[in-house]
Image (cartoon, rainbow, N blue to C red):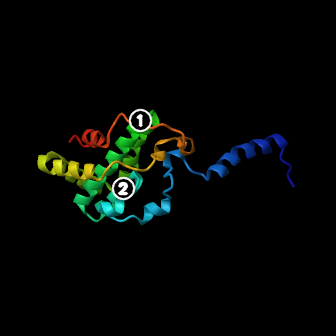
Amino acid sequence: MMKMPTGKLLALLLLLVPVLISGCQSPGKSLSGKGAADLQQVQCESDMRFIAADLPAQLYQRMNNCIKSREWGDATFLYALAGSKTWYDARRVDSQYAHARHSRLLKESIDSLSSQQKKTFWDNVQLKMNDGQKRDELCQRVKEAGTPEYRPDYMFIDPFNAADFNFSNRVSWEQAVNRYLEC
């Protein structure tokens, strides 16, 4: 049997323990109470009775499912709602990580689509956003979704340290929607 020097064994142990404790999760992928299994089960759904409590990651997954089934109106609404929520949450947390997380969540979601799906989706978003009446209707519908009532733990590098965080109230839900969607 080969004998491993004590120093090397200790170094190996110190490298492996954090990985085992963290469950091999990257802080950037944390869903804070919403597991990967939940994301696999979401459907293309934009009825607020069913999606009001969804975190942005779930809304983006719903958006992707709508894109795959070519339900452009629902996909656009879910894009607008998820983006408004992350914009609002990033302003409430107001950190460099949170602002980057706002953009990264959409990118991670969109990256799972084919280039044709992306192009067709963005073409449909632009059609809606360039039509003043349709954009106003979208803005109103997102505002009516109401202020998110969850804690935006996903906006923290370490969500466990978010428990005592005092969130900024400098931005309202309506302001967030107006800024994100240019209402």
Task: Judge whether residue 127 can be spotted in this image.
Answer: no
Q: Earlier in the sequence, mark 1 or mark 2?
A: 2
- Tell which of 170 and 135 is nearer to you: 170
Give the x, y percent position of residue 128.
Answer: 17, 51
Give the x, y percent position of residue 2.
Answer: 85, 52
Query: In this image, 140 relative to 62: left or right?
Result: left
Image height check: is 45 above or below 146? below
Q: Which is more foreground, mark 1 or mark 2? A: 1
Residue at 73% from the left image edge and 43% from the top image edge: 14
Task: Identify the disc placed on residue 39.
Answer: none
**CA separation, marks 1 and 2?**
23 Å
Q: Which residue is mark 1?
A: 168
Residue at 49% from the left image edge and 49% from the top image edge: 29
Q: Residues within 10 Å of mark 1 (few under 14, many from 20)?
A: few
* Quadrant of the rendered image containing residue 64: bottom left
Residue at 50% from the left image edge and 41% from the top image edge: 156
- Tell which of 105 and 111 is nearer to you: 105
Q: Residues within 10 Å of mark 2 (few under 14, many from 20)?
A: many
Q: Which residue is mark 2?
A: 59
Disc 2 on helix, strand or loop?
helix
Q: Residue type at mark 2?
A: Leu
The image quadrant where one finds the N terminus is bottom right
Disc 1 on helix, strand or loop?
loop
Query: In this image, 112 relative to 129: left or right?
Result: right
